[in-house]
Structures are given as C-alpha cells and as structure tokens.
Amino acid sequence: MDLIGPGLVDIAYYGTTPAGDPNSVNATWNVYLAKSMNGLSGTPTFGVKKAVAAIHMGAIESSNGSSDRSLLDFFQLAVDSSGNANIVNTAGQQTGTDLFFVKEQ
C-alpha cells in the first residue's frame, strides 16, 4: 500500500479532553495526529492518535496581549517520502519554551 499520494491526509493539532475556549480552559494539552487514507472520499475516515503527551498545562492563549504565549506560534507538519508525519512543535510554560521534533513510526 502506498503511504503517499492522492487522498492521503495528515493533520496535526493541539488538543485536550476538557471542552471550552482554548484561551481560558485550564487543561493538559497534547499534540495529536489525524490520518486519512481516503481523503478524497465523500465521507473520509480519520484515525487519531496522541503524538506527544502533556506539552502544555493551562490555557493555550492565542489572543494578543495574553498572559501566556509560551507555545509561541510555531507548529509544523511535513510528510516524508515514506508517508510518515514529521511534527515540530513548541512545548512550555511561562517559565520557558522548548522546541521538539517527533517522527511518526
């Protein structure tokens, strides 16, 4: 089976279990990877897995002037020639931010 080509979709995102406005919800945030092999279908299906656990605690504040911008605005996903997702993301708190790389296996 080809892991790259038409209809193959990878989406990476920050997510958490509690619902609410990410600017105010107090939660543990993770990086998730959603992958579809039939993205051109009228009803595509996605498998979702946690790619990186606990990258941030508290709110993910995206508005200007917020008190915690430790995740910055850096989040990147690229798919390599083998069809594996390569994710670069920041993780941190107000005390500091680190840069991480994870490759789908």
Image (spheres, grey):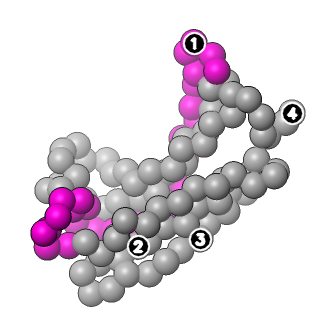
Q: CA distance from mark 1 to mark 4?
A: 21 Å
Read off the magenta span: 40-68
Q: Which residue is mark 2?
A: 91
Q: Which residue is mark 1?
A: 42
Q: Residue at x 69, y 28 (%)?
A: 7
9 relative to 31 in the view: left or right: right
Residue 96 quadrant: bottom left
Mark 4 and mark 2 residues within 8 Å of each other at the beta carbon: no
Q: Residue at x 48, y 67 (%)?
A: 89
Provide residue 91's location: percent of width, then percent of height.
41, 73
Q: CA distance from mark 3 to mark 2?
A: 11 Å
Three-letter code for the amino acid on which mark 1 is drawn:
Gly
Residue 28 quadrant: bottom left
Three-letter code for the amino acid on which mark 3 is drawn:
Phe
Q: Which residue is mark 3?
A: 101
Is disc 4 surrounded by few (<14), some (14 to 19) or many (20+) residues within 10 Å?
few
Relative to 46, residue 20 above or below = below
44 relative to 17 in the view: left or right: right
Q: Residue at x 64, y 21 (%)?
A: 40
Q: Secondary structure at mark 4?
A: loop
**Residue 103 or 65: which is nearer the viewer?**
65
Q: CA distance from mark 2 to mark 1?
A: 36 Å
Q: Which residue is mark 4?
A: 1
Is disc 3 surrounded by few (<14), some (14 to 19) or many (20+) residues within 10 Å?
few
